[in-house]
Amino acid sequence: MRLDKLLSNTGYGTRKEVRQLLKKGMIRVNGAVIKDPALHVDPAKDTITLLGEDVVYKEFVYLMMHKPPGVISATEDKYDRTVIDLLGSEERHFQPFPVGRLDKDTEGLLLLTNDGQLAHHLLSPKKEVPKIYFAKVSGQVTEEDVNEFAKGVILDDGYETKPGDLKILQSGDVSEIELTITEGKFHQVKRMFESVGKKVVYLKRLTMGPLILDKQLKLGEYRELTDEELSELQKLDSTKQKG
């Protein structure tokens, strides 16, 4: 990789700004001052420093966000605030994107990354990655609903969902439930409840595959995934659909 590209990708400025750093002799590779921006380096083997501080190359970023309501799961929008707008400049530099989407009024776990391959595996229908939602539902959720969800329900467009695992936490005029599904159709949780004559009034995603929403994250906050969390996610890349 070209030295100027590596430094730019790592957040040390534009290619033009990086070339100025090189001209001033501020960059060393394996101890030697380098002024040639086209020098090819290997971040896994070469030691690169800026004014004596090691340059740590990072190609991908993986962020767990507690998405707040009122923000859309997109990289840009003309009218609404997006989840990217909640990030700092250091994170935005990597040009991450949300993996999947949460509705504008839905909150909870959202993964943002620039790792397209990982995102593809997480979203692939063949992987059947489970997602758990907590919801408040207007109307009394019953065991009959549990049985219907377990078989799969017919949505308003005629689509039959895959089985969902519905757990009733509290039943009443406003019921509280947890629902595990392996799909991500448009407004799916809301439409599944509409199919049994009920309405979701609050929705929060708790998990996505092995990722569990960090309870320490307040609405709108985010953090990088831990090594353990990332390792568990990456296992999905090599997991093949059985049968």
Image: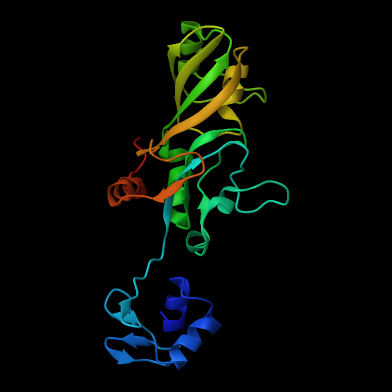
- Is the N terminus in the top left, top right, bottom left or bottom right quadrant? bottom left
Q: In this view, does 202 lie to the left or right of 125?
A: right
Q: In this view, does 50 lie to the left or right of 66?
A: left
Residue 185 in the image, given as x and y percentages of width and height: 57, 33
Residue 67 in the image, given as x and y percentages of width and height: 52, 40
- Is the C terminus in the top left, top right, bottom left or bottom right quadrant? top left
Q: Is residue 60 above or below residue 57?
A: above
Q: In this view, does 163 lie above or below 72?
A: above
Which residue in the rendered view is the most extreme toward the right? 79
Q: Residue at x 34, y 43 (%)?
A: 240
Residue 105 in the image, given as x and y percentages of width and height: 61, 33
**Residue 160 visible, this orientation:** no
**Residue 196 visible, this orientation:** yes
**Splitting the image into 4 quarters, where does residue 16 fall?**
bottom right
Q: Which is nearer the eye, 60 or 234?
A: 60
Q: Which is nearer the eye, 74 or 28?
A: 28
Q: Which residue is drawn at 32% across and 46% down?
A: 229
Q: Is residue 26 left or right of residue 176?
A: left
Residue 136 in the image, given as x and y percentages of width and height: 53, 19
Q: In this view, does 143 lie above or below 232?
A: above
